[in-house]
Amino acid sequence: MNASKPIIAILGGSGDLGGGLAWRWARAGYDVVIGSRTQEKAEQAAAELNNEGLTKPVLGMSNEAAAKAGDVVVMTVPFANHQGTLESVKDIVQGKVFIDVTVPLVPPKVGTVQLPEGGSACVMAQDFLGDEVKVVSAFQNVAAAHLTDASHDPDCDVLVCGNDKEACALVVELVEAAGMRGWHAGPIANSVVAEAMTSVLITLNRRYKIPGSGFRITGTPKV
Ligand SMILES: NC(=O)c1ccc[n+]([C@@H]2O[C@H](COP(=O)([O-])OP(=O)(O)OC[C@H]3O[C@@H](n4cnc5c(N)ncnc54)[C@H](OP(=O)(O)O)[C@@H]3O)[C@@H](O)[C@H]2O)c1
């Protein structure tokens, strides 16, 4: 790993949140690899981001090749595909920092908190991948829309939860590199709060016609 900037691999980076984060991290000078179930889709997604004014090009690979290439692996796939994607990279990500952004939404009632039997998506990821993988939960409350607009303020703080303090500190840095405020908010068990909060934000968006609500930690000098 480069001492100052790890290579970031984003599984499902062809999607909305993964693509937006990829663009922001590449703009901040990180080497970013987009993963997809197919090489062609990954290359296509990377080419589209590179057309959005990136000077440091994003690469596209299969999810497995991206997971191998990354120092930090970020998983950005729907909850319905959470377990399957974990299975496909379990052996490859041993020893790595693994950021899970998954919200365990159960359509059609996405405005209602419906936690999985395993407790939370990120707790399930940590349990399944094992203690050698430093699973960190982050970004569940950030609306993906407009992330590739540099002037757009996501207007949302990011709760960062994980059992490894150094891994969480690194993820807080990555949150800030992507233009948001990150807070190390405790162990992976606390991820349930961020995961549940998303259904509350979806409800607020609907009720008050907010394009993409977020939240801020208040009473702090951190800017
Ligand atoms: N969108 C948001 O605003 C937002 C905000 C906070 C958190 N999140 C969370 O972030 C994650 C990704 O959300 P998103 O909106 O970016 O999702 P998305 O665009 O619907 O999908 C992301 C990627 O997941 C892959 N995928 C789709 N179906 C799959 C399957 N059956 N098996 C394996 N991979 C599959 C696809 O990649 P390939 O086809 O290239 O493999 C797709 O491009 C979700 O867990 C969501 O809860 C989203």
Image (spheres, grey):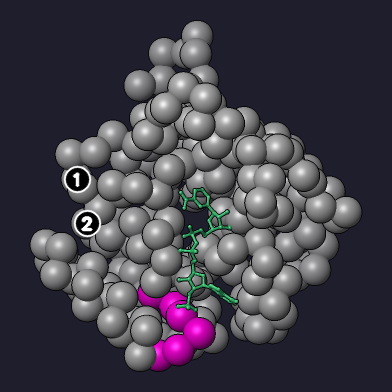
Mark 2–mark 1 contact, CB under 8 Å?
A: yes
Along the line of sight, which residue is nearer the eye, 74 or 39? 39
For the image, the number of numbered tags is 2
Residue behind mark 2: 27
- Residue 37, magenta (yes or no): yes
**How far apart in space, not on screen, are marks 2 and 1 (Cα)?**
9 Å
Q: Secondary structure at mark 1?
A: loop
The residue lying at 68 percent from left, 66 percent from top is 80
Quarter placement of the N terminus? bottom left
The residue lying at 40 percent from left, 49 percent from top is 144
Location of residue 111 in the rendering, given as x and y in whole percent from the top left corner: 64, 38
Quarter placement of the C terminus? top left
Image disc number at residue 150: 1
- Residue 60, magenta (yes or no): no
The magenta-colored residue range is 34-39
Q: Is residue 88 visible?
A: yes
Q: Is residue 201 visible?
A: no
Q: Secondary structure at mark 2?
A: helix
